[in-house]
Amino acid sequence: MTRYSCLELLAQRPGLSNSDLARGAFVTRQSMNVLLQTLEREGLVVRPAQAPVGKVLPTRLTPSGRRSLAKATAAVRSVEVRMLSGLTEADRESALRILRSMVRSLRG
């Protein structure tokens, strides 16, 4: 899931740093760095060899990374549809409200 989160964050906001990605995926910087190294080796993301400014290495998806994200998004959406299929509309709204509250708490 962290892998998917990382790719999704980069699709939404290209150029994020390791620290930004770690915060967005709720993992440590060290864990995100290991993941980014793996994604680089697999050709899914690129980072410059040297930071253009300061120490930050802005990360971007490659075309292969975008294709991988599209496949993962379809799989995640399929699970989401199955997971919510037994809920009423009111239950879905409540679940979404509760999940948003949980995310806010994690960010706080």
Image (tube, rainbow, N blue to C red):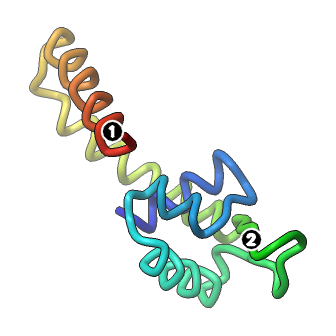
Q: Is residue 23 left or right of residue 93?
A: right
Q: Secondary structure at mark 1?
A: helix
Q: Quadrant of the N terminus?
A: bottom left
Badge 1: few (under 14), some or many (20 or more) residues near its Cα, within 10 Å?
A: few
Residue assigned mark 2? 56
Residue 25 marker: none
Q: Residue at x 73, y 65 (%)?
A: 60
Instruction: Please tell me which residue lies in front, 95 or 86.
Output: 95
- Place of residue 3 in the rendered image (x, y in percent of width and height, measured from the top left): 44, 68
Q: Secondary structure at mark 2?
A: loop
Quadrant position of residue 36: bottom right
Residue assigned mark 1? 103
Q: Is residue 91 left or right of residue 96?
A: left
Q: Amino acid at mark 1?
A: Val
Q: Residue at x 73, y 69 (%)?
A: 62
Badge 2: few (under 14), some or many (20 or more) residues near its Cα, within 10 Å?
A: some
Q: Residue at x 62, y 90 (%)?
A: 41
